[in-house]
Amino acid sequence: MRRFLSSPIALFTSLRLTVVLIVLSILLVVAATLDQVNLGLLAVQEKYLRAFIVFGRLPGTNIAVPLFPGGYLIGGLLLLNLIAAHVYRFRFSWRSAGVQLTHAGLILLLFGELLTGLWQRESLLQLREGETRRYMEDFQRNELVIIDTSGEKTDRVVSIPEALLVGRGAIQDPALPFQLRVTDYAPNAELQMRSQSPHAPPSPATAGVGPRIAVQRLKQVSKSDERRVPAAFVEITAAHSLGTWLVSPGLAEPQSFTHEGRTYQIGMRAKRYYVPYSVTLLQVTHDTYPGSDIPKNFASRVRVRSDDRRDDREVTIFMNNPLRYRGLTFYQHQMNKAEGFTGLQVVRNPSWVLPYVSSAMMGLGLAVQFGLHLIGFVRRRPAGNRRALAT
């Protein structure tokens, strides 16, 4: 029994395991860097770094086979290895205080990276001068929306995640008096008028603009500066069919239909994140160096007003000077001075402070350990040598 218990402990506290995991992490980073040319940054992160196992496909088939441990698996094992070694191998003493602090900082760094991968969210706030918005858009995720526009003052919106469209099945929401059935779905597509694609196959759509539009399937987008445009055909049924509709972010406007005396709109758009405050763009500034077109400064003057009336202030956002407000960070990302347009990248990362704390802990730990060794070295020298060093 003791051997059974001591074997896992010896394994997870082993320095050899630490070395193996570090080598595997280096190989993983090298492979991800080389494959970034083919896949792009976003796809590489999902395939290599934010996965437990890296899968590949057999040549000429769609069979996925495991190839290599992913970033989550290597990082998790390394975190477990550090914690186990910290608990079972090290005993706290002032002589090892620096090592303990350095290890604790490294553990916190790995744990912070895990939280960042799980919790971080990026979106975009696009505004024109004078425009006010209270939501951000995620251009990597989309949502199918059904909007009841029959209300006098407000619209009622039912949002359905894009992930539910992949299965091409029935969707029933308690807030809707009808059922949705996804008959076809393309994760990335190009939309063209049928007059420009005379040889396109017949459209499954029977209502709205769908019958006049041809859908061409494209490869998945993987680069961070490209946007994926999905498309789906959705049939609306109640007592009878209300038609099959083409929905896609590539369509300029949602499409309208009526049911039981109420007016609805159906469409697909970038996923929205609503916040309890509004942001108004007051002014955009684009300065260049005299006598050239080289950008000198991009800045957006915005007004932030909370719903509870506690905050009402103006802030200037420019490069390296973001706005931090209620857990979100607003960075200057895009700018078009001629059109009075700005794009603010909005990042939510509750664990953003952990890398700074862990780096400070590791730096302090190394300094303490070096200082303790230096003091011990000086004390072990003969008195005559110490006086010679002092002079």
Image (cartoon, rainbow, N blue to C red):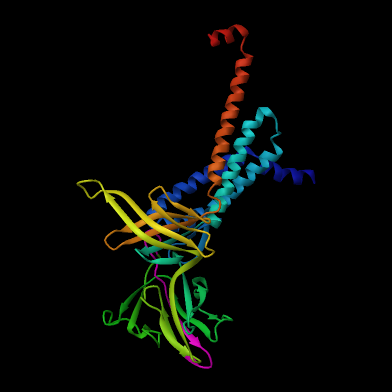
Residue 382 location (% of width, % of height): 62, 9
Side of 277 where 200 appears, left or right:
left
Q: Nearer the viewer, residue 119 or 163?
A: 119
Residue 100 location (% of width, % of height): 64, 35
Specify the farthest residue to the right: 1
In reply to whether residue 227 is colored magenta, the answer given is: yes
Residue 7 location (% of width, % of height): 72, 44
Residue under the point 46% across and 89% down: 258
- Above-or-below relation of 80 to 203: above
Residue range of the region highlighted in magenta in the rendering:
221-241
Specify the farthest residue to the left: 291
Whether residue 223 appears in this view of the structure is: no
- Above-or-below relation of 228 to 30: below
- Above-or-below relation of 365 to 384: below
Residue under the point 50% across and 67% down: 274
In reply to whether residue 271 is colored magenta, the answer given is: no
Specify the farthest residue to the top: 384
Residue 80 location (% of width, % of height): 64, 46
Q: Nearer the viewer, residue 63 or 109?
A: 109
Side of 61 where 97 appears, left or right:
right
Residue under the point 62% across and 31% down: 98
* Residue 304 in which image quadrant: bottom left
